[in-house]
């Protein structure tokens, strides 16, 4: 059957591989892998023997067309990243787009996500968030990216490599100030998993004497709501948007009350009366 399967793989602990993911990788005709050497270790662990084709950022045009042609000819393909869900800060996004353009069926086999896993244990507001991925290495692009987020009220999620972490924290502090809360999650699901919770000033100070190790997910607090900035109507509108997003009335009222001068009961009463 001509199908592309987007298969989530563990972000560190192989026990997080789902039964369905293993069965899917065993059933397809071939596997598109970000790094075939990394994926081979995973396949060997689960005794999966399938041909692979490398598919990464610098060959997506050439290999993407090859993969599409093979699927259109009747083969099934699974795409995997080195860790986590393909297509999130990953070239798999482009392959799914090509499948869409060619009316190829795409099915997802969900698995771990470093971004969502880190958000869940960050201690930050999880009701609304924005994924920002890796910041650019270009100073100009990085500055523009951060400037665009200055007034962002949603919790922000970034990825960062250990050797760039110190500079990134300094840039975040310059943009968002000393007191903004940040959660730094590293080596998730691995032996040395760690979650550090600071404000930005404390985070930069901490890593002055500590060498960052492992891949990091940074969870940054959104712009706090100052009491004088928000009217009751605005607070109710914020709660209404949370309800539209799936929250219950009581949960929405509680979330907004935490960040405004209005108590939960007042906001809830206004919502009920509507």
Image (cartoon, rainbow, N blue to C red):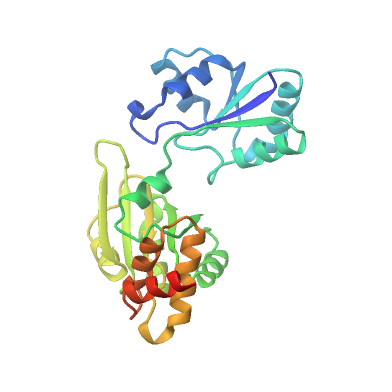
Q: Quadrant of residue 129?
A: bottom left
From this viewpoint, which residue is outermost toward the bottom?
A: 228
Give me the residue at 44% from left, 56% from top: 158
Whether residue 174 is visible to the viewer of this picture, yes or no, is no
Q: Quadrant of residue 249?
A: bottom left
Q: Position of residue 147 (x, y in %)?
A: 52, 72
From this viewpoint, which residue is outermost toward the front?
A: 273
Figure check: 147 above or below 39: below
Q: Position of residue 221 (x, y in %)?
A: 37, 65
Whether residue 225 is visible to the viewer of this picture, yes or no, is yes
Of residues 106 and 208, the one nearer the viewer is 106
Figure check: 274 above or below 17: below
Q: Position of residue 64 (x, y in %)?
A: 69, 33
Give me the residue at 25% from left, 67% from top: 202
| Total tally of numbered discs in the picture | 0
Give me the residue at 66% from left, 36% from top: 95
Q: Position of residue 246 (x, y in %)?
A: 47, 55
Of residues 245 and 58, the one nearer the viewer is 245
- In-image side of 73 versus 270 (left or right): right
Give me the residue at 72% from left, 21% from top: 70
Q: Which image quarter is the N terminus in?
A: top right
Of residues 135 and 139, the one nearer the viewer is 135
């Amino acid at each position: 059957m001509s199908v592309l399967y987007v298969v989530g793989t563990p972000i560190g602990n192989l026990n997080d591989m789902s039964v369905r993911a293993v069965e899917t990788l065993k059933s397809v005709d071939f596997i598109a892998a970000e790094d075939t050497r990394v994926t081979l270790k995973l396949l060997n662990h689960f005794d999966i023997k399938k041909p692979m084709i490398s598919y990464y950022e610098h060959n997506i045009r050439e290999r993407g067309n090859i993969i599409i042609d093979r699927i259109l000819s009747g083969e099934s393909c699974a795409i995997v990243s080195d860790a986590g869900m393909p297509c999130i800060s990953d070239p798999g996004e482009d392959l799914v787009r090509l499948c869409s353009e060619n009316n190829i069926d795409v099915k997802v086999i969900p698995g771990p996500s470093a971004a969502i896993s880190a958000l869940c244990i960050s201690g930050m507001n999880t009701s609304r968030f924005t994924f920002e991925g890796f910041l650019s290495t270009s100073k100009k692009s990085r500055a523009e990216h951060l400037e665009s987020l200055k007034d962002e009220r949603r919790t922000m999620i970034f990825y960062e490599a250990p050797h760039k972490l110190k500079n990134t924290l300094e840039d975040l502090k310059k943009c968002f100030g000393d007191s903004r809360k940040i959660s730094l999650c590293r080596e998730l699901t691995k032996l040395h998993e760690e979650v550090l919770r600071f404000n930005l000033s404390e985070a930069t100070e901490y890593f002055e004497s500590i060498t960052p190790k492992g891949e990091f997910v940074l969870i940054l607090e959104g712009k706090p709501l100052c009491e004088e900035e928000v009217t009751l109507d605005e607070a109710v509108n914020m709660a209404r948007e949370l309800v539209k997003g799936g929250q219950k009335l009581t949960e929405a009222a509680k979330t907004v009350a935490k960040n405004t001068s209005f108590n939960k009961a007042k906001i809830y009463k206004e919502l009920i009366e509507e």
